[in-house]
Amino acid sequence: MIIIGCDYHPGFQQIAFVDTDTGDYGEQRLEHSEGAEKFYRDLAAQGKKVRVGMEASGHARWFERLLAEVNFELWIGDATEIARKRERKQKTDRQDAQHILQLLMENRFPKIWVPSGENRDLRQLLWHRHRMVQARTRIMNQLQAVALNEGLRCKKKLWREKGRQQLEAFRLAPWASRRREDLLQLLDRLNSTISDLTQAIEQEVEKCPEAGRLRTHPGVGALTALAFVLIIGRTERFQCGKQIAAYLGLVPLEDSSGNRRRLGHITKQGSSILRFLLVEAAQVTARSIPEWRNKYVHLTMRRGRKIAKVAMARRLAIALYWMWRKGWDYEQLRKFGSHAGQPGNRDGVK
């Protein structure tokens, strides 16, 4: 078996490899993508079993597809853990590749979970819709500015039929009129695109029973439910709700020493889109459930609205995790949730 430690860069990769059968060792720099493809295809032609280890990195989809095509085993490791296990202060590409190879040989390589190709493709659907909505918001803000400059202040009513007629009826200078027409055309195209993407998400949720179950929670729609399932992947990866909150970057950054304890802003690690969706969904949940609303108001008075929103998003993430892990819908979560078994709960489990 050939074990390869790969220090991956967008333009090239530095590798260190060893043949466990013969003990042969080598190092090489492979240019992307022709040099790397030739090297790995030549190894595949020899019929040997190969394991490649590399840090989690972007811009490597083509490399992952290449290794899957030639049936090579790819291990992707946690970059932070790999750096933490480094003993030398000196850092070069050669030493990085050697370090990864050493971790592979000593069975200390911090391998992480990698989503499947289908999972990644569905994530692109979520990101595409998210970016289209952001683009539509920017266009709508520009059109609102045009309306305000002409003395029309109707907020959301501007996007109704009457408001749009008023916007189109303004007599503007030539280039201002051209800008208004182009923005309205872009807005119509984006509305159509977003509608199609939303329908596609609804169809994917119907195929996913886990997302359908999470959707029963008040405030959680198809987009949030599908994003949670795709990004979390498997509930077995986490032991408790605290790990879910840490994985999504919804816990405070801590810098404590001795008797001093300091908690800062949230870490913002993990998926930014899922964190955004959870914050948005948690606000709807707080308006829908009296218990959540009371908690949100209490936190707002104590810590401010921004911190309260994030705290409710963390609570929602933990609730969705337990719903998924236990196979519960929202009614079962209420019946057998965190207060099950306590005195006064008629549905408690002994």
Image (cartoon, grey):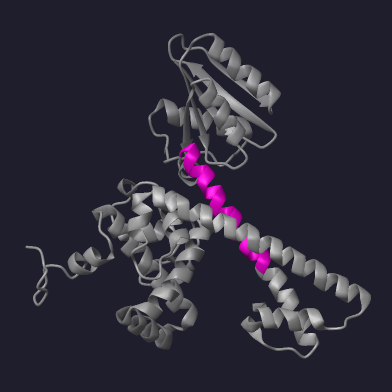
Residue 245 in which image quadrant: bottom left
**Where is residue 2 drawn, in percent x and y?**
48, 17
From this viewpoint, is residue 131 visible?
Answer: no
Q: Which residue appears at 60% of the width and 60% of the height?
A: 194
First to last magenta residue range:
116-136
Does the stretch in magenta take in 121?
A: yes
Along the viewing direction, whichever of 223 and 324 lies nearer the viewer: 223
Quadrant that contains the C terminus: bottom left
Q: How far from the left and from the top, in percent, is residue 171? A: 87, 83
Which residue appears at 40% of the width and 80% of the height? 287
Please state, as top left, top right, bottom left or bottom right, where the N terminus lies in the image.
top left
Q: In the figure, 144 relative to 201: above or below?
A: below
Q: Quadrant of residue 282?
A: bottom left
Decide which of 91, 27 is in the foreground and name it: 27
**Residue 253's spot in the image, x, y percent?**
45, 65
Residue 170 versus residue 25 in the image, above or below? below
Identify the residue at image location x=44%, y=28%. 104
Determine whether, in the image, residue 330 is placed left or right of residue 42: left
Q: Residue at x 64, y 22 (%)?
A: 37
Is 197 in front, or is 36? 197
Residue 147, picture quadrant: bottom right
Majority secondary structure of the magenta segment? helix
How many numbered circles does the render carry?
0
Question: Is residue 216 magenta-colored?
Answer: no
Is residue 244 shown above or below 170? above
Is 333 left or right of 177, judged from the image as shown?
A: left
Q: Which residue is at the far bottom?
A: 151
Q: Furthest-left residue in view?
A: 350
